[in-house]
Image: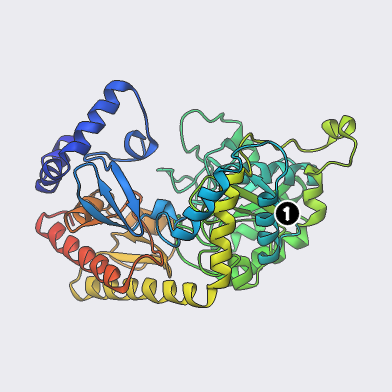
Amino acid sequence: MMKEVLELPIIQELMVKQKKCMEAHEQRQKDGTISFFTEGPRNSPFVPMIIKQAKGCRFIDLDGNEFIDIAMSYGPHILGHSPDVVVKAVQEAVTRGTSVVVGHELEHRLGKMIIDAVACAERSLFTNSGTEATMHAIKIARAFSGKEKIAKFEAGYHGTHPDVSVSSNLGTERRGPRERPQGVLDTPGICRHILDTTIVLPRDHEAAFAIIRENAEDLACVITEPMGPGWPKLNIDFLKKLREVTKEEGVILIFDEVVTGFRGCFGGAQDRWDVVPDMATFGKIIGGGLPLGAIVGRRDIMEVAVTTGNPLEDIKTKVHIVGTNSGNMVSCAAGSALLGYLKENQDTVYPYLRQQGERLVKEVNGFARENTMPFRLMGLESAVIARFLEDDPKDLRQMEQNANAIAEKLLPYYMRRHGVFMPDMHVVFLSTAHTPADVDTIIGALKSSLVDMRKDALY
């Protein structure tokens, strides 16, 4: 496959257009430096994208080519790259300190903002990333409940720590019947015993509730994205039933809001759809584009990670959560500035993103339908995913089985031809920096790419 792809006209064209990017990639290979985004095994760096500058909704690569970015770093840049309000806050903060391993006012300010905005949040705790947030949230749930097993949904992505590296959207294999998925490790390097403690649930299927009830005595928590790229369809009724069942069975419900937090409204999915979990994790937007994650939840649950005032006893009984740069001054300054802006401007920011996202989906899907192209954008408002599919999928497995994997891998390269950068994971995030004219360009690029790919017999 690799040889055939490299010989495609689109790849040959980009190798010339992005010659310096290619040379830089070769040098990185020689020097041994690795970036997940160019050398990582999940990516397909036929023509690696290496940039020198990002601002607003655009970036410039090493060759001087300008692209409209619709990756937005997979979600954090809701105002675009380096918005002035965040840059100013970071510049001021860095003169006062960076990582200090003691308490500081910026940490308190941001934590209080999140507690005030999020329905389930009675206490907050910062980590370095969304992955760390879900990892520690699970530890807290286990310590509070005294149980060891956890449950997650098939194709649900919660970071890369071992407990959740089972049957995620990074996986390539599904096993067992649709209603009773069998866990599959996402990657080499994960101990197989994880399959004994991580239960996989079917998304949007009544069987999930039966599995939870069957395992309730051993189940510390259920962790789920309210909606995510693994299965980009919103089912509020399912979330409400999930809340009911976990509450009835005494199982902690964790919402992974790393993507949905502050994306569709100020707060999170739980606030917008009135489904309140016991705990939630955040990342991406709350850091203002800098590394930051957060765990929030009910006071009684979060207390298992809080001192009683007796450290000699606490070290034996409390959950140990620490990170040198967790809640650092610069990230908290960036997050406080961004959330402050979103709170003050929520009546304009979110309706605008909703309008532009819905217009993007409507126009592109309409074009594909009119021209009998097996393609659709799926998702909600300013966060969508591109899939090559004949029909609207009824469930996750049908979506994965029917998708054209080769076409999906190559779509981002056709988009570059038309001046738009789409990531290999073909997840699209819009920002307020994307003007209506920029969205017109994105729509045009998708339409032209679909036409080009049909000419090249890729679908």
Left or right of 224, for residue 144: right
Q: Is residue 62 left or right of residue 284?
A: left
Circle 1: element type: strand
Which residue is painted at 72% across and 47% down in the image?
219
What residue does disc 1 label? 252
- Residue 398 horizontal/vertical position (percent): 39, 58
Instruction: Name the amino acid type tagged 1.
Output: Ile
Q: Residues within 10 Å of mark 1 (few under 14, many from 20)?
A: many
* Residue 244 image offset from top left, x and y in percent: 71, 66
* Residue 404 shows in this picture: yes
Corner quadrant of residue 78: bottom left
Can the viewer see residue 200 in this picture?
Answer: no
Q: Measured from the top left, where is residue 323 in percent x and y?
A: 64, 35
400 or 144: nearer the viewer: 144
Q: What residue is at 55 percent from the left and 70 percent from the top?
A: 265
Quarter of the figure with residue 194 = top right
- In the image: residue 394, left or right of residue 403: right
